[in-house]
Image (spheres, grey):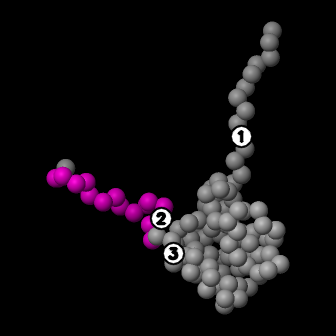
Amino acid sequence: MSPKQTAHVKHIPLRMCVGCRQALAKRSLIRVVRGPDGIRIDPGGKAAGRGAYVHDRRECWEKALQGALSQALKAELSPAEREALKDRMLRLPPDADGESDPPPAAGGSS
């Protein structure tokens, strides 16, 4: 008898958003890192230092900046770092995740 062949399922690392505490795939979150040069956004996700993850949603960033992010990074945010992260938050669309009501369909009533 031949051995059974099973499909190999690729492991997808999960990380938790510090704003909403929801676990998602690591690649779908934004990493903020506390490194030797301060706290900054890590676009590649591999910078050295202690990291924390946040959704690309404004409400998650607001909760994170209220204190969850500094607690996760085990460091206080300087005013300059806080402003840089707040600037990143303000560039996000208000409904980036698509959870808002969809626009009404064009072409008449239902």
CA–CA distance in space, label 3 to label 1: 33 Å
Residue at (51% x, 75% y) in the render: 91
Q: Amino acid at mark 3?
A: Arg
CA–CA distance in space, label 2 to label 3: 11 Å
Q: Which residues are magenta?
A: 94-109
Residue at (18% x, 52% y) in the render: 107
Of mark 2 and mark 3, the one earlier in the sequence is: 3
Which mark is drawn over residue 96? 2
Pick the quarter of the image with the N terminus: top right
Q: Is residue 85 magenta?
A: no
67 with respect to 104 (left or right): right
81 with respect to 55 (left or right): right
69 with respect to 86 (left or right): right
Residue 20 location (% of width, % of height): 59, 67
Q: Which residue is mark 3?
A: 91
Q: Which residue is mark 1?
A: 10
Residue 80 location (% of width, % of height): 67, 88
The secondary element bearing badge 3 is classed as loop
Q: Is residue 95 magenta?
A: yes
The secondary element bearing badge 2 is classed as loop
Residue at (26% x, 58% y) in the render: 104
CA–CA distance in space, label 1 to label 2: 28 Å
Do callouts 3 and 1 mark residues in contact (Cβ within 8 Å)? no
The secondary element bearing badge 1 is classed as loop
Density class for disc 3 (Cα within 10 Å; few <14, some 14-19, many ≥20) is few
Residue 55 location (% of width, % of height): 59, 65
Where, by quadrant of the figure, is residue 43 drawn? bottom right
Where, by quadrant of the figure, is residue 45 drawn? bottom right
Which mark is drawn over residue 95? none
Where, by quadrant of the figure, is residue 33 drawn? bottom right
